[in-house]
Image (cartoon, helix red, strand yellow):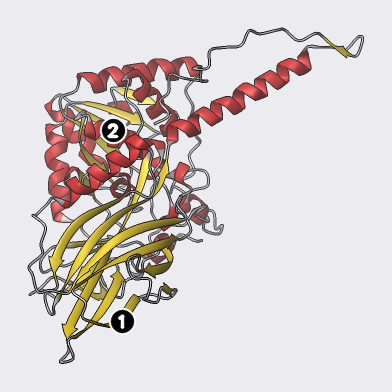
């Protein structure tokens, strides 16, 4: 998959320095600097993180100015790089999830991002604590009411253009636009205001995976220095701001953040992917006292928007064996029925999940009521409800967990709609680290076995006998598996 975003940008000859050599601190220096960074974070009162493309390279998304970056290859006249993973399937990196934990622990107050991949929001960072200066390729916005729509697939346009869709809020219907800024576009005022505000208040700005070359964004971290704040830069290449840094770390961002979290004694939470859908039922009574009803399974962003996490849906009626079951293959998923003398009905929806999901199926018991009664859940904060579900799923490592976010009456007809949130996958970076360390351990063991061979005689030496460890022993047990 090519990077459609980069291809759609207007041409610009001067994109700054590209293809600079990568620099690596020695193991001893890196360990010392990581300890120092952890100490700075622990002592800070208002830490702000400033992120660039370097935090997403481990997610399979190329950077811009690295040896194989987008602008580097373009400058050399070579084809644009391919993303190892489509944007909509990319998982947040270890660094993304470490930042989520620091936000939850109130050690991190705000994140300023130049990235358009949407991974900060997908990781679980609250929208109020994030400024996406260059936009989000999954986001559309209504200029009239300012409502944001986070899509499951990339928005087709860039440059703050109309997307062809409209706001679904009642009494609005404004034409939606994308949020990606092109070279000549000004940064979004709301995002820039918040970024400047927190940069000025910061006593520590941590720059992760950014070359700090794109203006005006690259000058935001310097605002902290004017009030006595400290600047830390973690990047594999040199930046124009290196001389102003209190601490300069040349290392892979994921490795640095893994070390920092260990020194802070903070676990790196797993990435919990949550998908949402609306199950609605409208009905009408006939003169024959039968009820005609329509059951629809749709996206929270509109009936025409696809539900990419679903392959098909089985519709069953556990307490009514006389009713015919259904298998819905094509979206929109709709069931139309007419039933005699029916006031209520329990429906079992068996969701068959698609590519990228760790669960094969999820079952939801959904109750239909064909009486005219007001049904609305108390107002809840959507982000709070989503965060609660995310934490619960992470704590018990349960994929397929379902939560009801809202129940409301349909505005134009008799019936109601229920919004569901579904945990469709869980990925634990700590386990990935364990596997890497175990692979290294076995590789070293293999080399040690090869070296133990008496080449003079051609016979392996007798292996050393080890006593069995406790059943509770786990390799690298200092790293949490949750």
Percent across and percent down for residue 8 are: 39, 66
Of tags 1 and 2, the one toward the viewer is 1
Classed neighbour count for the residue bearing mark 2: other residues with Cα under 10 Å, few (<14), some (14–19), many (≥20): many
Q: Is residue 403 left or right of residue 248?
A: left
Q: Which residue is mark 1?
A: 336
- Most foreground residue, 51 or 260: 260
Q: Residue furthest right?
A: 457
Distance (Cα) linking label 1 and label 2: 46 Å
- Residue 252 in view here: no
Question: Which quadrant holds residue 40?
Answer: top left
Say which of 19 and 4 sits in front.
Answer: 4
x, y (%) of residue 62? Answer: 47, 49
The answer to which of marks 1 and 2 sits earlier in the sequence is: 2
Residue 101 circle label:
2
Q: Secondary structure at mark 2?
A: helix
| Residue 427 left/right relative to 265 | right
Q: Position of residue 143 (x, y in %)?
A: 14, 67
């Amino acid at each position: 998959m090519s990077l459609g975003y980069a291809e759609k940008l207007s041409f610009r000859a001067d994109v700054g320095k590209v293809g600079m050599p990568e620099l690596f601190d020695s193991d001893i220096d890196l360990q010392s600097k990581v300890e120092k960074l952890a100490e700075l974070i622990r002592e800070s009162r208002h830490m702000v993180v400033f992120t660039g493309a370097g935090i997403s390279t481990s997610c399979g998304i190329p950077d811009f100015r690295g040896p194989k970056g987008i602008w580097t290859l373009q400058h050399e006249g070579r084809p644009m790089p391919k993303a190892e993973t489509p944007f909509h399937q990319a998982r947040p990196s270890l660094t993304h999830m470490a930042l989520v934990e620091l936000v939850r622990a109130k050690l991190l107050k705000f994140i300023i991002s130049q990235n358009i991949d949407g991974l900060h929001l997908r990781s679980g960072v609250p929208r109020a604590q994030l400024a996406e200066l260059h936009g989000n390729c999954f986001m559309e916005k209504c200029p009239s009411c300012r409502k944001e729509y986070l899509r499951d697939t990339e928005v087709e346009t860039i440059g703050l253009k109309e997307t062809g869709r409209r706001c679904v809020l009642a009494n609005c219907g404004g034409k939606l636009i994308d949020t990606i800024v092109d070279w000549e576009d000004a940064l979004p005022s709301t995002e820039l205001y918040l970024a400047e505000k927190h940069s000025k208040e910061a006593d520590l700005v941590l720059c992760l995976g950014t070359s700090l070359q794109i203006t005006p964004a690259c000058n935001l971290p310097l605002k902290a220095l004017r009030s006595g704040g400290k600047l830390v830069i973690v990047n594999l290449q040199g930046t124009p701001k290196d001389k102003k840094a209190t601490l300069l770390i040349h290392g892979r961002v994921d490795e640095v953040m893994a070390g920092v979290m260990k020194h802070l004694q903070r676990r790196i939470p797993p990435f919990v992917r949550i998908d949402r859908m609306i199950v609605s039922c409208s009905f009408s009574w006939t003169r024959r006292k039968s009820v005609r009803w329509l059951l629809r399974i749709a996206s929270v962003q509109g009936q025409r928007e696809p539900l990419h996490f679903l392959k098909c849906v089985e519709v069953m009626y556990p307490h009514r064996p006389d009713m015919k079951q259904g298998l819905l293959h094509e979206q929109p998923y709709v069931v139309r029925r007419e039933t005699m003398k029916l006031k209520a009905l329990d429906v079992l929806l068996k969701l068959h999940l698609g590519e990228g999901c760790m669960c094969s199926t999820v079952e939801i018991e959904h109750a239909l009521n064909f009486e005219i009664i007001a049904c609305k859940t108390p107002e809840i904060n959507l982000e709070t409800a989503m965060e609660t579900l995310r934490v619960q799923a992470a704590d018990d490592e349960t994929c397929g967990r379902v939560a009801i976010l809202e129940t409301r009456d349909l505005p134009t007809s008799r019936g109601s709609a229920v919004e569901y949130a579904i945990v469709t996958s869980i990925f634990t970076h700590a386990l990935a680290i364990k596997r890497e360390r175990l692979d290294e351990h076995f590789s070293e063991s293999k080399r040690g076995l090869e070296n133990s061979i008496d080449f003079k005689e051609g016979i392996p030496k007798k292996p050393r006998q080890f006593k069995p460890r406790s059943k509770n022993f786990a390799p690298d047990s200092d790293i949490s598996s949750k």
